[in-house]
Amino acid sequence: MDASLLELIIPIAGLAAVVFAIYLARDVLSRDKGPQAMQDVADTIREGADAFIKRQYTTIAIFAIVGALVIFGIISFVETEDVADVPRLAGLPIGILPALAFIVGAAASMASGIIGMYISVRSNVRTAAAARRSLVEAVQVAMRGGAVSGFLVVALSLLGVWGIFTAYQTFVADVTVREAPFLIVGFGFGASFVALFAQLGGGIYTKAADVGSDLVGKVEAGIPEDDPRNAGVVADLVGDNVGDCAGRGADLFESTAAENIGAMILGVGAFAIAEVAGWPTPQAWIFFPLVVRGFGLLATIVAIFFVRGREDEDPMNMLNRGYWVTTILSVVGLLITTNVMMNTGGVVPSNGIPAWIWFFGAGVVGLATSVAFVYITQYYTAGSWRPVKEIAEASKTGPATNIISGTAVGFETTFVTAITIGIALFASHWLGSQAELTNAAGHDVGGIFGTAVATMGMLMTTAYILAMDTFGPITDNAGGVAEFSRSEAGAREITDRLDAVGNTTKALTKGYAIASASLAAFLLFSAYIDKVNLIQTNRGEPLLESVNLANVEVFIAALIGAMLVYFFSSLAIRAVGTTAQSIIVEVRRQFREMPGIMDYTQRPDYARVVDITTRAALRQMVLPGAVAVITPIAVGLLLGHEAVAGLLMVGTIAGVLLATVLNNGGGAWDNAKKYIEGGHLTDDAGNVIGKKTPAHAAAVVGDTVGDPFKDTAGPSLHVLVKLLATITLVLAPLFIR
Amino acid sequence: MDASLLELIIPIAGLAAVVFAIYLARDVLSRDKGPQAMQDVADTIREGADAFIKRQYTTIAIFAIVGALVIFGIISFVETEDVADVPRLAGLPIGILPALAFIVGAAASMASGIIGMYISVRSNVRTAAAARRSLVEAVQVAMRGGAVSGFLVVALSLLGVWGIFTAYQTFVADVTVREAPFLIVGFGFGASFVALFAQLGGGIYTKAADVGSDLVGKVEAGIPEDDPRNAGVVADLVGDNVGDCAGRGADLFESTAAENIGAMILGVGAFAIAEVAGWPTPQAWIFFPLVVRGFGLLATIVAIFFVRGREDEDPMNMLNRGYWVTTILSVVGLLITTNVMMNTGGVVPSNGIPAWIWFFGAGVVGLATSVAFVYITQYYTAGSWRPVKEIAEASKTGPATNIISGTAVGFETTFVTAITIGIALFASHWLGSQAELTNAAGHDVGGIFGTAVATMGMLMTTAYILAMDTFGPITDNAGGVAEFSRSEAGAREITDRLDAVGNTTKALTKGYAIASASLAAFLLFSAYIDKVNLIQTNRGEPLLESVNLANVEVFIAALIGAMLVYFFSSLAIRAVGTTAQSIIVEVRRQFREMPGIMDYTQRPDYARVVDITTRAALRQMVLPGAVAVITPIAVGLLLGHEAVAGLLMVGTIAGVLLATVLNNGGGAWDNAKKYIEGGHLTDDAGNVIGKKTPAHAAAVVGDTVGDPFKDTAGPSLHVLVKLLATITLVLAPLFIR
């Protein structure tokens, strides 16, 4: 097959995913919305979510426009000084291309967040209604609702990168296929910029509402979760949508976009070798990442039809079945792509095995890493294994030992995470270097390209993972809707089961996001060095040959990078604490001043709590966001381009590990509570220690502590890590001294 | 003055400190031991502490002997292969010199731990007795008891390094003054090896006993802290001595030893320049670090006499007065030393200012950093400032928000820590580079030597800081003895005040230890590169020019280094949790089976709890200790000498920041509880929320969580960071490929 024919898979798969998402959306929207009581609460949730998203995205849009103007000004100012022959759009200053890419990336990210939210606030009630009839139907509604998000986010990112790449190459004078990947990094920066604020704002909102209403309702007033007497409960349900759906959608949108562009930049190195050597389709090395992701989308479309099963089956099995179908089809897609696109014109490395086979191996390493993280996360956060049991046992001696034990578990999870990432990086780098791609300067390009292929392999399943992830908040919301509208016990039992599964899928997604961020870190870092050296070559300055930790500037920047991760998390966690306290004060006031609430004769003022949370969350997202954006720029300006690379690398390592601690610790606390609620904890005499015991109260404390860890700070760190990469990539010209 | 004359200050100051310590010990021991009830409990504590220390140090001694044999074997095997002209002792294999240094370092560290313990278990009861008469006398007894530790630890480390250096140079054939610093790194490794296990075992013991008896006594049974009815309370008092005194003594012993040797290794670079240029006293650049520390000891001797005041004065003021005296006299000592020893024979840098003035400036930066950390730690952990108040406020809404708020504070403290360290490193490096010491290869040696001088400046006050630190557990114990022996209310009020001050001084020491570890990291790292390049030069192999984070092996090693810090802390924290739970179970059993305990008619079985804690703590220290030792060796063997440098650097950054989080978070939680107990927290109407309120219970949870953070994992991380440096320094020949 011809490589340029295979490139057609990019628009085809992208459009097919969009069409399929529309089909799924129509399917979900056509379903039964349940009795009026359900629809009423769903409408309230939708209104709250709409109001928040509208205000949040307005704020973010303003930030993004300012950001674009700054980029335009800086790049134009810095680069025009000493670069004459750079590509230009209609004679405008050269900052226009990255600034435009930034705007398009930001807009596409915002669109994917809004779409995800739109469908999830409509799937929740339909899942709750379906649960009144059938488990399988409820799973399908929630999964299809989630898949709409998954497909649109991934398709938008694929079409966006491809579209802007093609547009720049076609419509801008002098842009070659070698230069275009560098010019579109602004797209990734725009996406991470929006994702940062979306994840922060949504994450603060959702967890402040969750923590606040749990503490004041479950713990203080002793009423169940999601009880309609709790004025904070609607805000909590709104939060599931704005934090978990919109936030995670923006997060994975930018992951796929930034990592894709990074892989294309590394592809330029392979392209140069292919061109010099006269191999048949040199540009295929650059398009490879896009084609691989196209196949991933097609694999996911097929897999959605495998999400089905028997009424008495574990819902997790149904989802796992689809995941394995996606993975296996992805391997096939990877095989086709590497075979066709990595054409060395018959040249074979000295080991006798063609280059494409080595890269296929690297891609499989990426897919295997993804599978490994799915199971690692399950081990650490699911109730059937040692870590969660240990925390549940520690709850017997009170909240302090629960917290100590959970912290120990969270810290412990870094071990297997780091070892797995280390092995994956080492293996994919080794496999890639066996392909013997050596550039004109005598450097091995294959090793680093191997890690890029592994990252792309890993990202093939993103749409499916994102669908599973969005399944989580939809079922969580469905449970809330069922509880709130006092639905039948059978339906609530089904939504409870789905909710537990949703907790697991949400945890899996975080493990997946972390693993891909770590693999990608190395590739984005290499892309940064490539970009710096492209500029240095243009300027006739010496190249950046190493990022030397023994330089005092690099060491200081590395220290600041590691510190940034803690400081940023501190601001994010404090934001949740502050916002939660204002919710607690308000709900307490309502309990005190409206005595009819407790016997259902008075309706709590839900809207007031929603409004308080919205204002506070938007105010609180500004400081951590600003710190994340300003720190790398300040360090780059003060300490230079080598030092900022140290900040990027060590900040990434620190961020990945702290996010692992926060995500897994939080997930384990959550499930230790569920473990006790499920009646699995017993005393020495074998009696069950269940709900309403001191041990359960201790576990609730742990769960509450874990909430801002796993749903605000942790996911925001994923975005931070990638923002560091895209910001340094785009602003590299500014830092070179 | 002649530089070699000034070198005499080393043995003089060392011996003077020993004599002065003996004087102080005799003074303390001659004081009143109080009524029989006090002496009884003090005897029980002493017996428990002796039993623990005996068993612990026997175990550590066995480990140390094994360690020495392994070093002997490895170094002899690796280096004899290709190094012919290395110094030898009596024709033995070359591993004998580092192995011997290791044994001496380990023995000296154990001796300083035992001495510290010996005096502290005798000062506690005398402080309690003095508190029955006078605040000032109680402060003096506790401070002098602490100073015995401080002087002996620092003097032993100074005399040890000087002694083994002189011995190797004098008695071993062919050892030049240039080679000797490299041969004595084993001393530092031996010291860190012992410190690791001493700090881990003691830290686990003290916090398990503290957490266990607080939870089961204060929280569950509702009886006061240190109440004699609680069977865990003697173990808790024993723990103060074995963890805080012996552990911290070993920690600072190895800090001063390892950093001193590292500075001497960097001095070799300056020595080479001085020798080539024909400056008058080239060896003075190597002896400089020892002389500076001698002056620090003399300054501290004078300062001890300034610890006095009025009965109504804040005891912290008395201690601060002595600290400032130490600091100011240290500046004078630094001025003399740099002026005399950094003699460039009239050669002046191009900026016209003599080299010694630049280095004097770097030393002042070190002293200023020490002062800065004293105040930073106070801000974050003392009740009069925002962070502690914030945590106390958050306690109003329960333990979950208390924990969330404390975590946010802990994370936040990394900001000012990293910025201060960054500035100190940058400034001392810049000052040093102004001295224009350029070696034969054209590299600047002055910059890195500037950071070494700063570290030495910082370490001048170690003896005083250690005295203040040991003041903490002595007063803590005195309070326990007073409470336990049901002493007069007036005496208990005084010991409570001293205990609060002791909490602050303990926190200060940790800030100081962290700051010196970070400054030292860069110098020890440079010493490692020097050592590798010495070996490479001997072998005729290419030098290690940079530690390049863009190398995949270095990146993976860096990731593992950062992970190690979390994994090690996880094991340490879990050890405390596990041990605490067994104490809780035992004390509960005693309450249940011995009903007479509650009305004082039955005496609890203290010895059984002490025994359970001893066994558990010693068992639990093995795994984290082994992980800390094995990981750098495994990474060095698998990934090579450049990668292990990445592990060292990034592990240090991660360790310093995590220790900051754990120490300051824990300290802030502790003082938030004390803030509430002091009646400073009020509700909206202005009513005091004090003891026995839900807010206080929440604050107790936070305090308990913070205990293993700040007294087990945090301080153990200080040791881990320096162990990484000494282990790679000693085993460097093994890692070179």
Image: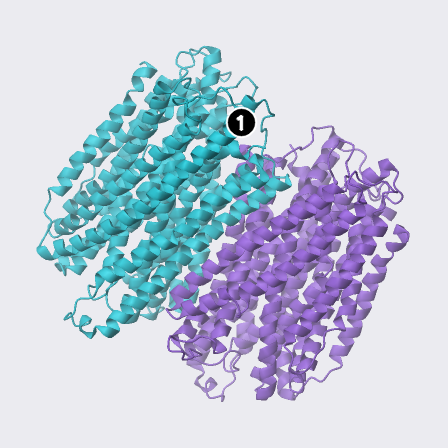
Chain colours: A cyan, B purple
Q: Residue at x 39, y 40 (%)?
A: A66
Chain under callout 1: A
Whether residue B420 is visible to the viewer of this picture, yes or no, is yes
Q: Quadrant of the N terminus of chain A?
A: top left
Question: Relative to the observer, which residue lies in front, B655 or A81?
Answer: A81
In the picture, measured across the screen, residue B456 lies left or right of residue A173, that is right
**Residue at which label 1 appears:** A81
Decide: is B149 above or below B475. above
SS state under label 1? helix
Query: In which quadrant is the C terminus of chain A drawn?
Result: top right
Amino acid on which disc 1 is placed:
Glu
Residue B575 image offset from top left, x and y in percent: 51, 60
* Rendering quarter of residue A31: top left
- Residue B440 locus on image (x, y percent): 78, 32
Position of A665 relative to A359 (above/below): below
Pinpoint residue B457: horizontal percent, then vertical percent: 73, 55
